[in-house]
Amino acid sequence: MDPRLNHFTKIDTSIEHYDGCPAFIEITGAAYTRPLYNSSIPCYSMCASFFKKRQGDYLSLVADQRKIGRAVIEKFLKNESDILDVYNKWLGNFSTLMDYFRNKFSEDLSKLSNDELSEWSNNLTTFYRDTIQMPGFSDGYMFYADKRLDELLTAYCKERDIKNRMELFAILAAPTEPSFLNEAENDLKRIGQLCVASGYDQKNSLLDFLKSRKSECVLIEEHIKKYAFIQSSYAGYVPYTLEDAVEKIAKLDLDSVDDNHFLINEQIKRKTIEEHDFTKEILAIARLTEIFIKWQDRRKEYTLTAVSLRQKVLDEVSRRTGVSDEVLVYAETAEISKILAGSIDIDEIANRQDGCLFFYENGRTAAIVTGTEAIDFFDNLSHIELNDVTEVKGLTASLGKVCGRAKIVMTAQHINEVKPGDILIAPMTRPEHTVGMQAAAAIVTDDGGITCHAAIVSRELKKPCIIGTKIATKIFKDGDMLEVDADHGIVRKI
């Protein structure tokens, strides 16, 4: 048995379920155990991913989350620049990253020799992992900070007999800047409004109108190039086409005026802080959360651009070797050159589809465990005795109270099955879940913290949302009638 298996126990393991494959999590997963720019901020000591049939489960240690979260808050309280300097440096490198992506995404890999293609692939991994680097402490802070803020607010409200603890939590954790999804939507809205001003009749085909208008067509082509990665995920690259962009514009209310809810969030937050004598730690978490929400958002762009470029490599390798994409998505960068040279057993990689564990340490994949050893380990680790549980509790990301029928979405492939009024229940939401979140009456997740995608988007949509229930996808079934009481952080079967 691999000794690394002993590091993860039910008590000390956090599990995040998502759509994903090893080829696309490699850069992200390894970076969680790599210090950022030799910063003194700690990161995870070890992480692991369990993969099976294009789905993944990310394993991290709760002890690491506490260590990271405490360190970030303590450093910020002592000297804010300890965090801000690292953050600002990363934002500077992020600009370099986006230039790199736009240049590399347009390259024709079919013109490269096998050796050149291997080098292109290796350079891609090195650039993301070593030059830009993933902030390996961001999720650790997130998972610790939401629990710590809830603890601090519970004590604060109890001492002062304040009844709206969940409301205070939601206000202090609210984002104050737009996400890249907001920015992309606003971009499309401006293009749509320009089309209307140029004579477009919304009853007719926007696609035909755009094709007949050179200036507007150039704008939307630039938008598609800028956000070429936006429909991708840890499961792989999904093209963003003109038709996709036009369909998005058609769903926007082009007559509406932006209510600038991020400015409203900030105003409400500042007013709330002025009205209360919050402790220094509560105030630190509120400010850090603003920073980490934006950091995590940029990190998603880091990840999705890496996924898009990695897919270019896999597509070209598949074209040359005849090895299917379904197999190649289970290969790591170091194995690409061996696949091109025909010097690796493809069956060894193909067998990972049925269940495998990747362990990450010091910015690298430390070990790969396959077969029954990996499957039995994960099954035992993730098994939970439920015993007729009919309600779950979590943290409030967005206030409100609604009733509706449950729709369990374990993979984003089924997100379009969410109907208006459903209660969307997922392990964790990501950008590819947004269409279902827009249809749902409320959102409930197993995982996530105050800076997670579900928390941010639900506030923008003004829909009730409860995060971090741990077991909602296991407790409820499709069609169950549920009450989501986000004002008190409870989801119950009715």
Image: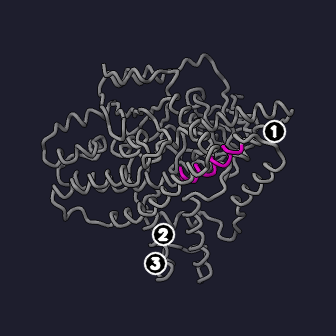
Image quarter (top left, top right, bottom left or bottom right) of the N terminus: top left
Q: Which residue is mark 2?
A: 223
Q: Which residue range is magenta in the image?
A: 283-297
Q: Which residue is mark 3?
A: 218
Q: Quadrant of residue 476?
A: top right
Q: Is residue 55 above or below residue 391?
A: below
Q: Is residue 86 visible?
A: yes
Of the pair 224 and 422, the residue shown nearer to us: 224
Placement of 58 over or under 112, stated as above or below: above
Q: Earlier in the sequence, mark 3 or mark 1?
A: 1
**Left or right position of 373 against 252:** left
Any part of residue 438 in sight: no
- Tell me the element at label 2: helix
- Near mark 1 (Cα within 10 A), the count class, few <14, some 14-19 or many ≥20, is few
For badge 1, the amino acid type reads Asn
Residue depicted at 57% across the width and 63% down the height? 183
Q: Which mark is residue 164?
A: 1
Tag 2: Cα neighbours inside 10 Å, few (<14), some, or many (≥20)? some
Q: Is residue 343 above or below residue 98?
A: above
Disc 3 residue type (three-letter)? Val
Could you tell me which residue is drawn at 18 percent across and 62 percent down? 112
Residues under numbered marks 3 and 1 in contact, where contact means CB atoms less than 8 Å apart:
no
Q: Indicate the amino acid at tag 2.
A: His
Disc 3/disc 2 C-alpha distance (Å): 9 Å
Task: Say which label, 3 or 2, has the lower sequence index.
Answer: 3
Q: Looking at the rendering, in which quadrant would you find the C terminus?
A: top right
